[in-house]
Amino acid sequence: MSGTEPEIDEVDRGILHFLQKDARNNATREIGEAVGVSAGTVRNRIEKLEEAGVIRGYVPDINYEKAGYQLVILFTCTATNPSETLAKDILSTHGVVTVRKLLAGEENYHVTVVGTDTADVSEIANSIRESGLEIVRSEVLDEELVQPFNHFGEDVPRDDE
Amino acid sequence: MSGTEPEIDEVDRGILHFLQKDARNNATREIGEAVGVSAGTVRNRIEKLEEAGVIRGYVPDINYEKAGYQLVILFTCTATNPSETLAKDILSTHGVVTVRKLLAGEENYHVTVVGTDTADVSEIANSIRESGLEIVRSEVLDEELVQPFNHFGEDVPRDDE
DNA sequence: GTTGAAAACCACGGATC
DNA sequence: GATCCGTGGTTTTCAAC
């Protein structure tokens, strides 16, 4: 199907574990010392992981409310006429931050949007409908916590703490 | 309430816009040229944004399936006995990658988990129940797209391109 | 708060094992 | 495939505006 299955070993898991904690402020040498390889190897592994599509990119974890966008809304939707590009179309809509497509069920699209006020959110809702989603329910998001992957490197020996 | 409201200006928005695209492989000098300030100022602003809590951290965007965790499940739950630390407790559970707490409604907790097989997911489900969540529904996630914040910097003047 | 320059640090590339 | 090393670029620090 999708072809190659990348083999993720302990070194890769350790690297991914480190990147989870902080994907920006760290050095390959520091990671290498923690997982037991050289800095150059860390760089090679990261490159492989990126090429294999395991790592899709690096994003900042942003607190929307503190950034001035007080409203964070979760729209539960039904795709009336699903197309191949529907998810990507929705994602490119102003205000949309995440799109989750479920494998089955009626309410098979979950769209998270952020806005400054209700009028703003209302406009976003209209855009979503025009793209081909019927909004079944809209709810206010109170809190969202992200732990991108707490599996990696759980059994990697740590020299500190 | 939460106290200080950080003032996000055009420079901050431009910086956030750049970090969205790639939070790891970029130079402060490059960002500075795009938004019209020096590299040092970019670093100062980023530090401010981090201290203010606008930027909570930097995380890799990982494709779970390609990393060997084929099952990505969305649990829709109801908090039977909500506590202050419930969301954080759930997040620290093995296999849990995101916790979304809704402001109101019966099914007010959405928990995304990843696992290697059904037995793995079943164990995770048990852990979630033990933490105080009743699982109302479980669905298979087909696709998840993230666009952390496409608002920032849309109207920032660019001197090139 | 921002800027500019010097120094320490790091990533990147090739050669080697 | 992993490691070492030299070079260019970048972050960092500090003085000055």
Image (cartoon, coloured by chain):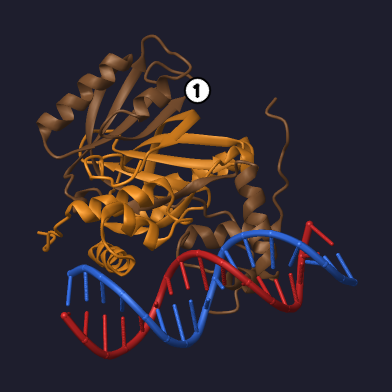
Chain colours: A brown, B orange, C blue, D red
Q: Count of labels shown?
A: 1
Residue A52 visible at all: yes
**Foreground residue among B27 and A62:** B27
Residue A145 visible at all: no
Q: Which residue is mark 1?
A: A103
Residue D12's x, y, as percent?
Answer: 39, 78
Q: Is residue A21 above or below residue B63?
A: below
Check the picture and name the quadrant holding the N terminus of chain A: top right
Quadrant in which residue A76 is drawn: top left
Residue at horizontal 37 percent and vertical 20 percent from the top: A107
Residue at horizontal 61 percent and vertical 72 percent from the top: A29
Residue at horizontal 43 percent and vertical 18 percent from the top: A105
Residue B126's x, y, as percent?
Answer: 50, 44
Quadrant in which residue A113 is drawn: top left
Residue A47's x, y, as percent?
Answer: 63, 52
**Foreground residue among A4 and B157:** B157
Q: Is residue A161 above or below residue B112?
A: below
Q: Secondary structure at mark 1?
A: loop
Neighbour tally class for label 1: few under 14, some 14-19, many 20 plus, Cα within 10 Å: few
**Foreground residue among B89 and B151:** B151
Quick check: B79 left or right of A84?
left
Amino acid found under the numbered disc labelled 1: Leu
Residue reaching furthest to the top: A81
Q: Is residue A14 above or below residue A78?
A: below
To which chain does the residue with label 1 belong? Answer: A
Residue at horizontal 37 percent and vertical 45 percent from the top: B99
Quick check: A74 left or right of B145?
left
Residue A19's x, y, as percent?
Answer: 52, 59
